[in-house]
Amino acid sequence: MKIFPNNDKLSYMGRIDWSNPQEPVFVFPCTLVVMRFTGNILKVYLKNNNAYWDNYLGCVVDGRYFVLPLPKEGSTSLDIDVKPSKNNEHKVTLFKRQDSCHEITFLGFEIDDGEQLLQMPRKPERKIEVYGDSVSAGEVSEAVKYIGQPDPEHNGEYSNSWYSYAWITARRLNAQIHDIAQGGIALMDRTGYFNEPEQIGMESVWDKVRYNPTLGKATDWDFSKYIPQLVIVAIGQNDSYPYDYMKEDYGGEKSLIWKEHYKNFVCNIRKKYIDAHIICCTTLLNHDKNWDRAIGEAVKDIGDQKISHYMFKRNGCGTPGHLRIPEAGEMAQELCNYIISLKINNW
């Protein structure tokens, strides 16, 4: 029995392109679909659109975790292993492990004829939105043999949003998450690494669903579809490329321009979410402390009591490589404690 994407018993999370209700497109890390069903037969139908790296999906069935390799391009069906259960009921979570190195068009599930879908519970009331780079996306997080070391050679196989500090934080707080994170991205265009040599910054991505020019035309996001009580802005890590002007010339013109852009970016988020708490931060990944200094000054200049600057205990000096699972857990625990201390309304 085919289960089409617009079936009302499927539950979704993440910023999704719903322009075709029968072919929703998953772009951002942490985007997912969940289904409860009976029977021991399960297939998923999808189409992969590759920009770079090898691509993989994450899948959890009744608490068992799978990695599903994807073809570079085109439609495919994947058989998912389901073990018999006492009550013949199962839960599957299919999620995007990686950023816009690829897009997935979800085409539906298939279960055995005569079986049925079961009602999903309500989603958590708590909602988080994250704007970040590769660390927020969980890039290279599974390379646990390289804790505190530079990254190993890889082609996407170690990247997993499930183990990003962003999603760990959301799970620990029982919150939904929209993870607007892209590896290599900086705040402004023409800096950072994403889409090099014509770099695209978060200023050009934050209000989009689809944004990678390699994969098609950009599409806008309708902010009324998801109103978070908490926003995390973790940008400032890749902005030092190709020139680390905050380190070399803190009071210079480029540094001042960046701070103005940062303030405008945060204020634009405030205009969309007038009551949200906004936490501005960077991560444990090594970077010059002047970036955090600039963020702190920008937050102070904005002067909004619900916009704060948070510094982790090992901020900017925790690792020369991407955060592995334990380091992401360390960040998440600090964030959880800080978020709880904010006493957010309706949280």
Image: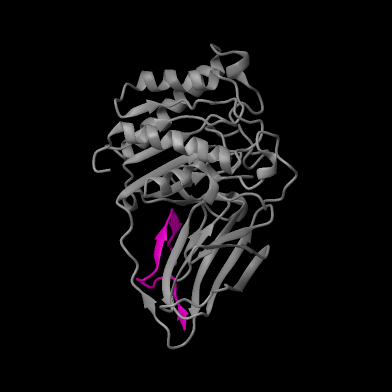
Residue 1 visible at all? yes
| Residue furthest right in the image | 153
| Residue furthest top in the image | 251
The question of residue 309 being in magenta is answered with no
Query: Residue 296 lies in what quarter of the image?
Result: top left
In the image, residue 138 lies at what x, y percent? Answer: 57, 45
In the image, residue 276 lies at what x, y percent? Answer: 31, 37
Report the side of 27 relative to 264 (left or right): right
Q: Residue at x 53, y 11 (%)?
A: 251
In the image, residue 109 lies at what x, y percent? Answer: 49, 74
Residue 335 sits above or below residue 311 on the image: below
Q: Residue at x 43, y 54 (%)?
A: 14
The question of residue 4 being in magenta is answered with yes
Nearest the viewer among 113 and 235 is 113
Residue 268 visible at all? no
Report the side of 43 relative to 334 (left or right): right
Nearest the viewer among 327 and 58 is 327
Residue 235 sits above or below residue 206 on the image: above
Which stretch is magenta? Answer: 1-19
Q: Residue at x 58, y 43 (%)?
A: 325
Report the colour scheme. Answer: one colour
| Quadrant of the frame with the C terminus | top left
Residue 324 sits above or below residue 317 on the image: below
